[in-house]
Image (spheres, rainbow, N blue to C red):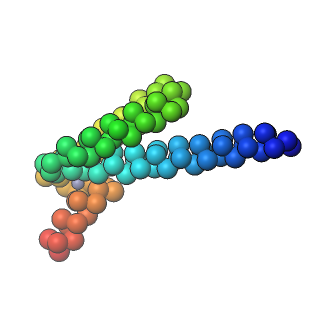
């Protein structure tokens, strides 16, 4: 392996790590957004961060727009729920409300 190949591989690895970090952060923010909006909490800051993360991801890795964006949005929408209809599995706010009510 040449130095140029090593450098290219190192650059690609750093890029992959950065992409995974941004995708992981996007998932955390999207979940907090879905939970917050389901419980009637203000989510403007989360929505702004979500938009910035998605813009950064699509700007740096354009293939994600087609490969992942729709799947992410569908998964986010699936987390929307009505807490008055019972605790939603996996929702930290429902879990906390149930814990406080106990
Ligand atoms: Zn909930």
What residue is at 23 percent from the left and 46 percent from the top?
45
Side of 99 where 2 appears, left or right: right
Quarter of the image for residue 101 reads bottom left
What residue is at 41 percent from the left and 29 percent from the top?
70
Residue 71 position (above or below residue 102): above
Give coordinates of residue 38: x percent, y percent.
19, 47
Asked whether the viewer can see residue 98, the reply is yes
In what quadrant of the picture does the N terminus appear?
top right
What residue is at 37 percent from the left and 51 percent from the top?
28
Asked whether the viewer can see residue 67, the reply is no
Counting labels gives: 0
Give coordinates of residue 42: x percent, y percent.
15, 48
Give coordinates of residue 61: x percent, y percent.
53, 32
Where ligand 1 lies, by image quadrant?
bottom left
In what quadrant of the picture does the C terminus appear?
bottom left
Residue 80 position (above or below residue 67): below
């Amino acid at each position: 392996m040449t130095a140029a190949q090593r450098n290219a591989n190192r650059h690609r690895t750093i890029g992959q790590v950065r992409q995974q970090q941004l995708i992981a952060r996007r998932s955390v923010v999207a979940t907090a957004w879905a939970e917050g909006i389901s419980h009637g909490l203000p989510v403007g800051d989360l929505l702004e961060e979500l938009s910035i993360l998605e813009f950064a991801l699509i700007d740096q890795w354009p293939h994600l727009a087609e490969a992942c964006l729709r799947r992410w949005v569908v998964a986010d929408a699936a987390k929307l729920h009505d807490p008055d209809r019972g605790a939603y599995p996996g929702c930290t706010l429902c879990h906390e409300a149930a814990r406080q009510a106990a």
